[in-house]
Amino acid sequence: MVEALVAAGAALVSAGVVYALAAARVVKQYERGVVFRLGRLRPDVRGPGLTMIVPFVDRLQKVNMQVVTMPVPAQEGITRDNVTVRVDAVVYFKVTGAAEAIVRVEDYRFAVSQMAQTSLRSIIGKSELDDLLSNREKLNQGLELMIDSPAVEWGVTIDRVEIKDVSLPETMKRSMARQAEADRERRARVINADAELQASRKLAQAAQQMSATPAALQLRLLQTVVAVAAEKNSTLVLPFPVELLRFLERAQQPVPAAPQPAAPPAPPGPQPVQEQLPYATPLPEGLPYIAPLPEPRPDGSPPGQG
């Protein structure tokens, strides 16, 4: 009798141990347990630690409550300004409702991934290329809002969404490079023109200052010559000042002679009368006078004979 009682007690203890081992479950700190009893969801969510369920009746399903980092595959689309781009992103989300994440959606990870891809393509179509390149914060907020709206019903909260990379065609890259180069060249020209304007103002002030003392201009010329002559591989051409040329020109001009006193006029007397020969014309002063030949006589005798 005693042996039967001992055997029964040992059997009960063994059954209790087996039952405890079958009913005991351990939920980790970053997990929550959802219990289904005969297929029906139990209202209480099991927290971290040791928990007990009814073996062969209850089924415990654990849900990870950590933040999940999910990369979004690169999506190719056309922007609002008709530029083909390829954009990829990353989504950070976590489960806030363990029961909703199990009951309301079959696979919340796959659902969030598909929603992120669809929202990313929609954002690409609504945005321009400049917004994708320079205004990413606003696009990230819009993308987060688009993904978070349906995910709330699944017990999932979107922490943040970041656009990782925007890939452009090679032709667009070259066009943007030319545009940036032209813009930099324009700014360089504006800066150079501004510098020329300031330099011209300073040169005008210097010219006004040197106009009062011409020797300062000569000294400045000599300083420039010294600066150029410092280089051994250059040919120096020394210009002459205009003032120096004018001085040499004035030095070569003859000095006008002193005026001499005029001779007294000759006393009046008979003036010689010059015979006005025919065909005679007044000659310039200093040339000898040549008398014209006499005309031949009517009888044919040579002129000059009796």
Image: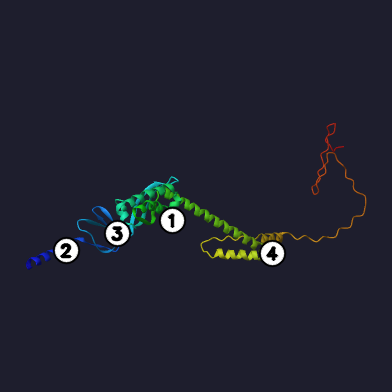
Give the numbered dot on residue 16: 2
Reading the image, the residue beneath label 1 is 137
Judge the density around disc 3: few (<14), some (14-19), many (≥20) Cα neighbours within 10 Å. Answer: some
Between marks 2 and 1 in the image, the one whose residue lies nearer the viewer: 2
Between marks 4 and 2 in the image, the one whose residue lies nearer the viewer: 2
Reading the image, the residue beneath label 3 is 45
* Residue drawn at point x = 10 percent, y = 64 percent: 8
Please, what is the three-letter code of the amino acid marked with disc 3? Val
Label 1: which secondary element: helix
When the figure is inspected, residue 294 is found, relative to residue 53, above or below; the finding is above
Reading the image, the residue beneath label 4 is 212
Label 4: which secondary element: helix
Label 4 to label 2: alpha-carbon separation: 120 Å
When the figure is inspected, residue 176 is found, relative to residue 210, above or below; the finding is above
Q: Residue furthest front?
A: 1
Please, what is the three-letter code of the amino acid marked with disc 1? Glu
Between marks 3 and 2 in the image, the one whose residue lies nearer the viewer: 2
Residue contact at pointers 4 and 2, CB within 8 angstroms: no
Label 4 to label 3: alpha-carbon separation: 99 Å
Between marks 1 and 4 in the image, the one whose residue lies nearer the viewer: 1
Q: Position of residue 283 (x, y in %)?
A: 81, 45
Q: Residue furthest bottom?
A: 2
Label 3: which secondary element: strand
**Dividing the picture into quarters, in which one does residue 161 lie?**
bottom left
Between 22 and 289, the residue placed more toward the observer is 22
Judge the density around disc 1: few (<14), some (14-19), many (≥20) Cα neighbours within 10 Å. Answer: some
Q: Position of residue 280 (x, y in %)?
A: 83, 41
Q: Is residue 105 left or right of residue 245?
A: left
